[in-house]
Amino acid sequence: MQRRINWQNLPSEPKGFTHSDLVTAYKQLHKDLVDCKRMKGATEGYLRKSKAGEREAKETAKRANKQLVTISKKQKAKEEAAKAGYWSGASAICVALTYELMKASNAWPGGIQYKAFWSHEAMITTLTFVFTAIFGWVYRCAHPDSR
């Protein structure tokens, strides 16, 4: 009795096959091989196109993200510079008003004999620096989210 051959699932050992069975099996295997190669080619082509589109989308997103961050950083730096300028200007105005008040009232810290000391350029610069540092400290306390 001859066994039936399942042509869709060929056995790994072709024992007992006749010549015509082997030819039929070869034709079936060849047809399956051609189908596999065609499917592999189609899959690789699709994946290549898909990968290129994915790469392009990633690059576009990366460029857009960098531009967005750059704009935000530039805006933030501009705002911080403006705020620093305002506070620095306020400290300079405070020093100028203090000196005008001392001149007008002729009341210098330590007395009139210290007028030359307080009017010296180095002292004015030092006081401006100290007032700027104090105003900066006040600004940082009032705005904890700033750097």
Image (tube, rainbow, N blue to C red):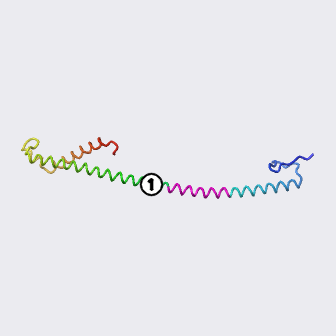
Tell me which amino acid carries mark 1: Lys
Identify the main secondary structure in magenta.
Answer: helix
Residue 71 shown left or right of residue 122 in the figure = right
Numbered disc total: 1
> Residue 142: horizontal and vertical position, in percent?
29, 42
Boundaries of the magenta span: 42-60
Helix, strand or loop under label 1:
helix
Q: Nearer the viewer, residue 13 or 59?
A: 59
Residue 57 counted in the magenta span: yes
Q: Nearer the viewer, residue 21 or 87?
A: 87
- Res 43 → quadrant: bottom right
Q: Is residue 67 above or below residue 110?
A: below
Q: In the orientation shown, which residue stands out farthest toward the right? A: 1
Check residue 40 for magenta coloring: no
Q: Residue at x 74, y 56 (%)?
A: 35
Residue 101 locus on image (x, y percent):
12, 46
Position of residue 143 in the picture relative to residue 116 (left or right): right
Q: Residue at x 93, y 45 (%)?
A: 1
Q: Nearer the viewer, residue 1 or 82?
A: 82
Q: Locate residue 42, reporting x and y percent.
A: 67, 58
- For disc 1, the neighbor class at 10 Å (few under 14, some 14 to 19, many from 20) is few
Residue 87 location in percent, x, y? Answer: 25, 48
Relative placement, left or right, of 22 versus 97 is right
Q: Which residue is mark 1?
A: 66
Image quadrant containing the C terminus:
top left
The residue lying at 49 percent from left, 54 percent from top is 61
Residue 112 occupies quadrant? top left
Examine the rendered structure and indicate whether residue 23 appears above or below residue 2: below
